[in-house]
Amino acid sequence: MVDLFLYLTPELLIILLASAAYVVAAWLGPARLWPWWALVTLACAAGALAVVSGMEGPEDTAAAAVRAVSYDSFAVTLRWLALASGLAIVAMAWYRAELATAGEYYASLVLLVAGLGLVAAANDLVLLFASLELISIPTYVLLYMERRDLEAREAAAKYFYLSVLASALFLFGAALAYGVTGSTNFRAMHELLLDPDRLSTSVPSLGPMAIGLLLAGVGFKMAAVPFHFYAGDVYQGTSNVMAAALSWFPKAAGLVAAVRVLVFALPGLEREVAWLSWVIAVATMTLGNTMALLQTNVRRLMAFSGVAHAGYMLVGLGAASLQAPPGAWFRGVDSLVLYLVSYALMTIGFFAVVELFGQNPGGRRIESIDDFAGLGQQAPLPAALATVLLISLIGLPFTLGFWGKLSVFYAAIATRDARYVVLAVIGLLNAAIGAFYYLRIIAYMYLRSGYGRVEYRAASPTFAVVVITAALTLLLGIWPRPVAQLAYRSATAVQGAFARQIPEHTRRHDVRRQVSTRPFRPTAVQAAVGAGHAAEY
Amino acid sequence: MPVEFVRNYLIISSVLFSIGAAGFVARRNLITMFLSVELMLQGVALSLVAFGRAWGNYHGEVFALFVIAVAAAEAAIALALVLVLYRHRHSLDVFWWQQLREPGTTPPVPEPVEEAEVSTEVHWPKLPPAGIEPVREKETIDVG
């Protein structure tokens, strides 16, 4: 038990420091200290993660093998990614210290990082649910605190109500998954479903329902059709910083949860996962790209672009649920990790560009895409970096976005499933549609003349975020080997963890004990009722 | 585990869940909408406990406790949010909140709701105000 808490030190540290900040902030109020506090918190968490990232879980007994957390490198990779993206978001929000609720604001921001880290490490439905809520609840608070106008209130309300509805759907799916398998632990679920004599009679009836409801729950987090309605309104009604956080943390958490639960924990239900994600992927990509074509508000446009990207991720998710042939360059799960890295860089980077021009009160804010006009002449360096990020969002070669899209579509084709080959073609067509609205922004920047004064602080943390994300997008686009290897290693690790047998000599004893310490014995009344039912049916 | 063990529980829990979902979609009052979601969560909690009993382990009960705890946290946020929304519009109707929308579309006009008869007479509670010393009649000492 001790090593479990040790392994989660980074997230626990963040939660502890954030809770302290919530208390202290009540007295301290706005202070320059808060962004520094967030930075220190994330640095402490990074230090702790560096120490624990090499930890291996005990595997000697089955009881030790079915832990609430997974020690694979998939989890560690995503926890690093969460920390790095959290650092970027805090840097973007550096000038919010004068907010009346600055302490609560930064504490909520770092809690998002802890939430994503826990989602990545979770190996149990209960922990997964709690950590998904650890992302959702600070998001409600942040949406509410970020802007003080009516639009922001409306956005917070819309996000809150739909998010609690989606949590309920996810929970019912989780309850049914537990009902089908008899355990909430992913490895135990996997093991129990594979065991033919344990295969319960309820799998055919309840299993597909569980898959559908779980996919609905994570679909909301990813902003997939038909749960994308909130995206445009909420992004438009909040600030650039929160839009960046919303387009990254819940989306990544939803995808990671889907990988763990739908791809690995429930074997025997791959057919349903593959079909459902096929249908949702087609609808999501097409609708996201089509709606984005019509937008003029830049955050609204990016919301629908995020919907389209969720569709590309679902292509990878479906591919991951099907067996990839050995020797494929990219399998489903590696393509997802690669895609997540590229998506984090380009979406946070692009929102940082938009935020950069809004920080100086005298200068021109970017609200609609018309405001990009002439930036190529007025602010050559940010415009060039924005162009790199937009090219990556399109998915053109020599950027990381290209490798993300390539790996996802390659994984779809590599399944040799006719549906998924068609899906890859639909995805490519969609990427072509998507190119239009990104290229339109580039065209506005370079081909139109600007109006108004453009000001930006070159020495600001936000500008550093822009530079670093654009540089990484370009460098890793030219030399993607490190990211591809990282993705391959983490995907292999998570597959290996589930493929590894729970130690045989203790397995029968312990895993069985997990599900039947208290055999079901109906009371006299229940037995009578059951007999009545049996006679009736 | 045969489904028969949990059938009745599952029927009740899915009925609760469906009533909640229908309420969320159909109602316009912000608080009622949130309560509908709570009903859905309670339906889930019931099915979790039933499954836990049927399987003979505690995973379901633990999960149900987590569901209740998270629902409480969400209720705290919900009430704060509803209060703020109410202060802006002096109404709990969700139709007041549709400014953010696709450009070029017009918001649907809500059907008028029959306002409940509310008496405008204010009946203040009959309690002595705290912190103020009650004014007493002239003090008399009964020596009788």
Image (cartoon, coloured by chain):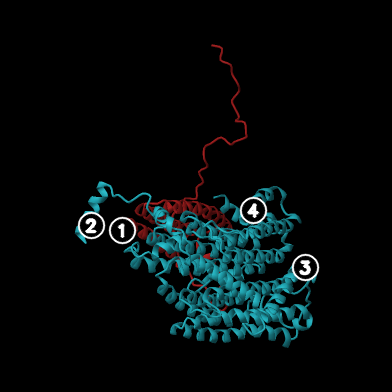
Chain colours: A cyan, B red
Tell me, for residue A533, which label it has, or none: 2
Q: Position of residue A382 (x, y in %)?
A: 75, 77
Q: CA separation, marks 4 and 1?
A: 43 Å
Q: Which residue is mark 1?
A: B7
Q: Is residue B99 visible?
A: no
Tell me, for residue A421, which label it has, or none: none
Where A22 falls versus B110 (above or below)?
Answer: above
Q: Nearer the viewer, mark 4 or mark 2?
A: 4
Q: Which residue is mark 3?
A: A460
**Tag 1's secondary structure?**
helix
Tell me the crowding category of disc 1: few under 14, some 14 to 19, or many 20 or more residues within 10 angstroms, Cα based: some
Q: CA separation, marks 4 and 2?
A: 53 Å
Q: Observer-nearest residue: A92 or A186? A: A186
Query: Do tag 4 and tag 2 residues touch (Cβ < 8 Å)?
Result: no
Q: Observer-nearest residue: A286 or A293? A: A286
The chain holding disc 1 is B
Where A39 falls versus A310 (above or below)?
Answer: above
